[in-house]
Image (cartoon, rainbow, N blue to C red):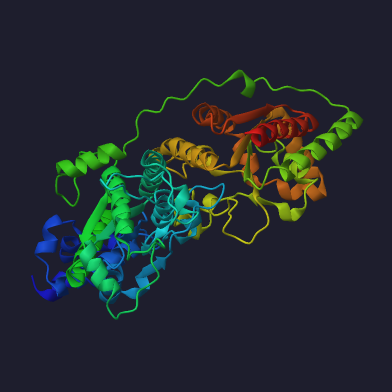
Amino acid sequence: MSKNNQDKPSSKRQQLPQAVSDQFNREVVDQRLTPNPLSQFAMDQDALRLALVTAQFALKATRQQSPPTSNKPTGLLVLVNGMEQAGKGTAVKQLRQWVDPRLLKVEATIGYPPLAYQPIWQAHTKAMPRHGDVMVYFGNWYADLLYNVMRMATDSEDENGNKESNKKSKNKSSDESQALPVAKWQVYLKQQLIELQAFERDLEANQTKLLKCWFHVDAETLQERLNDEKADPQFLYQIDWHKAEVIAQFNHVATTLLQQQEDWVIIDGCDKSQAATSFCHEVLQAMQEALASSKAPLSDASEDVGNKPLDDKQKNLRSVQKPAVFESVKIPKILKDIDDPDMDKSDYHEQLDAKQAKLAELLRDRGGRHVVFAFEGMDAAGKGGAIKRLVAPLDPREYQVYNIGAPMLYERQHPYLWRFWTGLPNEQTDRISRIAIFDRTWYGRVLVERIEQFADDVEWQRAYDEINRFEADLVAAGTLVIKYWLAIDKKQQLERFEDRSETPHKQFKLTDDDWRNRDKWSDYVQSAADMLARTDTKAAPWCVIATNDKRSARLEVLDHAIDQLSAFSES
């Protein structure tokens, strides 16, 4: 076949969704993008650079909207950690020179103590790459973890070389004199690593693939580089690398980390040039694997791809991506038999004032700890009205209310929970508020996205566990999570819709979607039942308020919040 005929796309090919530019020969592109663990021993520099750029543009193309691709939008996050002076900067600098710098983002942090009342990963969520991007992140959440552990684990040795982490010395600083025994800091480290590994698995499942690179050099090489004439960057973990005992302690901590998390790639930094080349190969492999995982699964694992039978690996991938048979729960009585009282208005206002005053007192006396309120419920169930009464006694600077609707395009180009992570109370910001109130929440994935098929079966069925882990991380860090499901019956909903349509200042609340959703009432009730059954946890239990009376519902919300905050302040 001549070059002209080879490069000219056929009519059949023009109809297929493309993942890379047609300027490349398709067979050559496929070869460059196919993961090949042996390529690092076979590719010269020019071939490596070309493969890197090809993979970059292929990843970028996964997020293109027109024409749509056959790949799920996918990004790559490269975590860079390890020993100081091990060639990390040199490696990333070379990668930047060899790829298209417009498609590579680099972020860098140094280690700080984890911020109060929030998971260790939360401060870093804004730096997440959007799908289609490659991001290299120096430091990241592991810098914070290692910084904290090194502070906890400062040790000395007796004359026999035995660890004496908990013994005090006259020459130690006050921080060092409070060092914990080995067993205690290891328990903390191992628990944090378990939580981080779960967080990272959820990132991977949501199309943000990870490559974790640990750079290492021996102590002698480290000292030579520290004492040369080259300027040193600010150290990731803010420790004194000139001290042999500090290096020994760091290696002890690092060994614990690397033994527990086996997904790290260890790069020998003794030869910086070779380390940089190895790093670039690892990034290439990670991009290729991300692209392979982004291919949309076929509906039948027996189907062929391009007239080629699926190999065992492809069949296994597709079988893994098929969800297990989902069994819905029996709808509980509380969601079907809705209470229908009629509270006296004067009695309501008397109780309301007292409960609001008590709630405000508890919120202001919580010691700065974070509080997250999550409101879900049927359309017109009174979420907005309950939130208004909840915040009425507070200053507007004390809280943030997030009204959640359909995600924007840039939000869809991140992991599903990302837009909620970035709305959490955050000690890193200058914002006064440490109270976040969500009017509709992350539960949309297992409610509207499930029913309207905005999320596929794998995504929404996986979300129950992802949400439980997310909430458990918040609670473990000291945040109080309070969740409400507000239920009304279908007749009461119709009355409220009609009232909105006839009241000028309420008409904006009623949309065509609200009317359309009434036709799927039973689907929403079943989805709510499944959600409550799978996400009512000890860490973050649900409060179900099932009443057709708005006044009663608002008071019940306040009563529950008061109970939760009272218990919270005593813990």
Q: Give the quadrant of the N terminus.
A: bottom left
Image spot of residue 434 (x, y percent):
65, 50
Q: Nearer the viewer, residue 28 or 417?
A: 417
Q: Is residue 311 left or right of residue 151?
A: left
Residue at image position (31%, 36%) is 322
Image spot of residue 472 (x, y percent):
50, 38
Dividing the picture into quarters, in which one does residue 430 lie? Answer: bottom right
Q: Does the image show residue 53?
A: no
User: Farthest residue in the bottom direction?
Assistant: 229
The image shows residue 332, relative to residue 517, as above or below, that is: above
Residue at image position (66%, 31%) is 567
- How many numbered marks does the figure carry? 0
Q: Nearer the viewer, residue 130 or 172?
A: 172
Q: Nearer the viewer, residue 64 or 562?
A: 562
Image spot of residue 432 (x, y percent):
68, 57
Q: Is residue 438 left or right of residue 496?
A: left
Image spot of residue 229 (x, y percent):
29, 81
Q: Does the image show residue 213?
A: yes
The image shows residue 337, relative to residue 198, as above or below, that is: above
